[in-house]
Every structure is written in C-alpha cells, then in structure tokens.
Image (cartoon, helix red, strand yellow):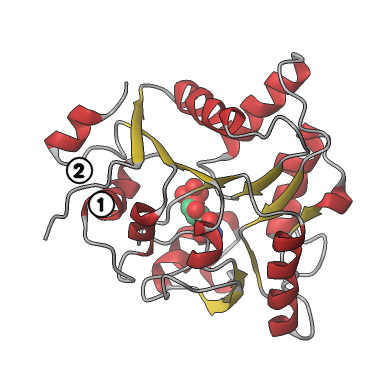
Amino acid sequence: MRAPMTPTIRLAIARSPHELATLAADAVVEALPGDRAPVLGVATGSSPSGVYVELARRQAAGEIDLRDASAFALDEYVGLPDGDPHSYRTVVREQVIEPLGLDPARVHVPDGTAADLAAECASYEQRITAAGGVDVQILGLGRNGHIAFNEPGSALDSRTREAELAPETIADNARFFDSPDQVPRRCVTQGVGTILDARRIVLVAQGEAKADALAHALEDAVSPAWPATALQQHADVIVIVDEAAASRLSPALRESARR
Ligand code: GLP
C-alpha cells in the first residue's frame, strides 16, 4: 500500500555523480551551525564517498572550515582489529579524518572489539549526547532498506546496539572483502531512533540496486520491514539520488523532485 510522502522529505534527482556530491555537500553545509563547532554524522559505504571529496575540496578552497568539527560514525563491524583495512574506523580515517583534517580525538567510531559491547553502545549514545547531538547526518541506504546496520525488523525507536547483519548485506559487502565468509556477521550500529535524533539527515543513494529500497523508503507506510521508512517521521530530511536509484519512484514523486 502506498502512503503519501510526508512534505518534510525533500528529494533531488542528480544527473551525475558530481551533481549528487555537490547537492549533498550543499545540504550538509546549509545545516552547519554558525556559532559553534559542528557535529557531523558520517556514513561509510560507496554512496557518501563523493560527498566527503566535495567537502574537502570546498575546505581546500577556503569556502568552509570543518577542522574543528566532531564526527560520529554510524556503525562498525564486530571483531575487526584496529587498523584492519575493512573496519569502518579505517574507512572513516581515510575518507573523513584525513581529507578534512579533523582531530581524531573528536571523531568517534563504535569500538567493535570492546570486551563489553553493551557498555560500548551505552557510552556511544552518551558521547553523542555530550557533544550536543548530531547537526547533520550523512546517510546511505542498503539494498534491503537498511540505514546504518539497522536491518529489516529493527525497531524504529532502537538505540546503539550490537546487531546481526542480514544475508543481503553480507552478500553486498563481500565486495570489500576477499570472500563472503570474511564479512563479519555482527556489528555495532546506531539505532534508528539514534539516527532520527540528528537535526538534519542527508540521504544519498546511487544505482539501480537501490531503486526498490528507495521507493519503499519514501512511499511505503512507515514500518520496521523497511527501516528507512522511519525517515518519513523526521522533520528535515534531504534525499539526493541519481536517476537509476529514482527509477522506481512513482511519477508523482519524480515530478516533485528538484533536478
Ligand atoms: C553498509 C553500511 C551502510 C550503508 C550501506 C550502503 O552496509 N553499513 O551504512 O548505507 O552499506 O552502502 P553503499 O553506499 O556502498 O551502497
């Protein structure tokens, strides 16, 4: 059943990866507070990587200065040691900390090697709160509708916790590993409720493989079956996608999109 999209989600369909990164960076920059150091929410995955490149370009050009920003990653695999090239800690260092010149002490990634993962999750929530909350969350979308590692069935008010990866996610993320059996089965992820606490959310999705998930996310009734539908409940979401990802949206929604 199709439910009308809430007017709080704004959709843009980009004509190129460059335009997608530009629009997403615009949406991030617009949400930066003018009077204090920003708190960024950073996603890993291939979709957001161009956004970090564009933010770094703007910083190098003197248009923005994010060097005093704090950042919180969405998720991490359980059990990958510090320095493992597949860990999201490594990805965040290479794609966010180094290009943007952030202070590593202010960039947080859940510790998937913590002996007490429940305590690590509670501490992660406390660190986000202590930082004043996330100003702008950059978010990707899983083929099965996951956000961060909140797989189908995740409670829409869930908080940071240990969770299990869905089979589709293991298959999708195997491209980053030598084989599917090397993909960790468990993760630590911000909850759907944690993500919804960000003041602005910028969702980026590219490619035909995301078309179904995007249509469900934006046009289905809100349900744990498609965790990204929870974004419809947020007051300030900007969705920036390419033509392929937008290909299964209803004509009415495609019409409403900014191009
Ligand atoms: C991973 C991450 C998600 C990300 C998703 C999509 O599973 N945990 O946060 O949104 O993949 O990634 P990509 O943008 O590479 O398709």
Label 2 amino acid? Answer: Arg
Q: Residues within 10 Å of mark 2 (few under 14, many from 20)?
A: some
The reply, left or right, for residue 228 in relation to residue 56 is left
Tell me which residue sits at (35%, 42%) in the image: 9
The reply, left or right, for residue 205 in relation to residue 65 is left
- Quarter of the rendering occupied by the N terminus: bottom left
Above or below, comparing residue 231 to residue 113 in the picture = above
Tell me which residue sits at (87%, 44%) in the image: 103
Above or below, comparing residue 123 to residue 98 in the picture = below
Dividing the picture into quadrants, the one containing residue 245 is top left
Q: Is residue 207 visible in the rendered structure shown here?
A: yes
Q: Nearer the viewer, residue 176 or 36?
A: 36
Query: x and y percent of residue 38 in the render?
Result: 72, 40
Q: Which residue is mark 2?
A: 248
- 3D distance between C-alphas at marks 2 and 1: 6 Å
Q: Nearer the viewer, residue 193 or 210?
A: 193
Q: Is residue 185 visible in the rendered structure shown here?
A: no
Query: x and y percent of residue 25 in the render?
Result: 57, 28
Q: Nearer the viewer, residue 173 or 241?
A: 241
Q: Secondary structure at mark 1?
A: helix
Tell me which residue sits at (21%, 32%) in the image: 254
- Quarter of the rendering occupied by the C terminus: top left
Q: Are marks 2 and 1 in contact (CB under 8 Å)?
A: yes
Q: Secondary structure at mark 2?
A: loop
Query: x and y percent of residue 50 in the render?
Result: 57, 32
Q: Which residue is mark 1?
A: 212
The reply, left or right, for residue 70 in relation to residue 164 is right
The reply, left or right, for residue 103 in relation to residue 146 is right
Mark 2 or mark 1, which has the lower sequence index? 1
Query: x and y percent of residue 143 in the render?
Result: 37, 56
Label 1 amino acid? Answer: Asp
